[in-house]
Image (cartoon, rainbow, N blue to C red):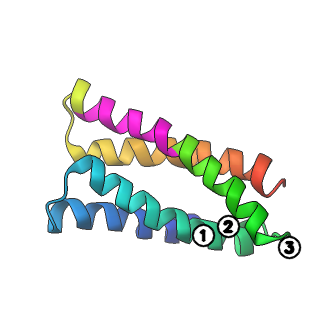
Amino acid sequence: MVGVINTIVGMGSTLTAFHVFGVNYALAYLIGTLIGVVCSFILNKYFTFKSGHHWHKEAFKFFIVFVIAYLASNLCLVGVVELLKMPHDIGFLCGMVCYTLIGYTLNKKVVFKV
C-alpha cells in the first residue's frame, strides 16, 4: 500500500507539472521526485520498515540514497526520451522503475537496516 500511495504522489506530481503546467520534462521529473521522496521517507520510516531510530540520522542517509537513485533514474529517463526517442510518459515510467528498485534496496539495506 505504501508503494502505491508513494507512486501516486510522485508520478502524479510529475505528470501534473509536465502536462498541466507545461514544465520541461526533466524539471517535472525532479519536482515529482522531490515531492515523492518526502512522502516516501515518512511512509517507509513508519509503515514499511517500522523504524524507531532517530529520524535525523535516517533522513541524512535517506537523502544520500535519494541522490544516488535520482541520478540513475534521471539517466534512464533522458536515455529513453533523448536516445530512444520514446514518449516522455514512457521515460517517466522507466525512470520511476529504476528509482524504485535502487531506492527500495538501498533504503532497506542502508537507511533502515532491515
In the depicted structure, whether residue 3 falls above or below residue 99: below
- Classify 10 Å Cα crowding around label 3: few (below 14), some (14-19), many (20 and above): few
State whether residue 48 appears in this view.
Answer: yes
Sequence-earlier tag: 1 or 2: 1
Q: Which residue is at 49% across, 36% downward?
A: 72
Q: Quadrant of residue 2?
A: bottom right
Q: Which residue is at 58% across, 44% downward?
A: 101
State whether residue 7 appears in this view.
Answer: no
Please tell me whether residue 51 belongs to the stretch shown in magenta: no
Highlighted magenta segment, given as a residue range: 70-81
- The secondary structure making up most of the magenta span is helix
Q: Which residue is at 30% across, 42% downward?
A: 91
Determine contact: label 1, label 2, CB under 8 Å. Answer: yes
Query: Which mark lies nearer to you, 3 or 1?
Result: 3
Q: In which quarter of the image is residue 19?
A: bottom left
> Can you identify the residue that label 2 sits on?
44
Circle 3 — which element?
loop
Query: Which mark lies nearer to you, 1 or 2?
Result: 2
Q: Quadrant of residue 9?
A: bottom left
> Can you identify the residue that label 1 sits on?
2
> Can you identify the residue that label 3 sits on?
52
Determine contact: label 3, label 1, CB under 8 Å. Answer: no
Q: What residue type is labelled 3?
A: Gly
- The image shows residue 50 at horizontal and vertical percentages of 80, 71
Q: What residue type is labelled 2?
A: Asn
Q: CA gap, disc 1 to disc 2?
A: 7 Å
Q: What residue type is labelled 1?
A: Val
- The image shows residue 53 at horizontal and vertical percentages of 85, 69
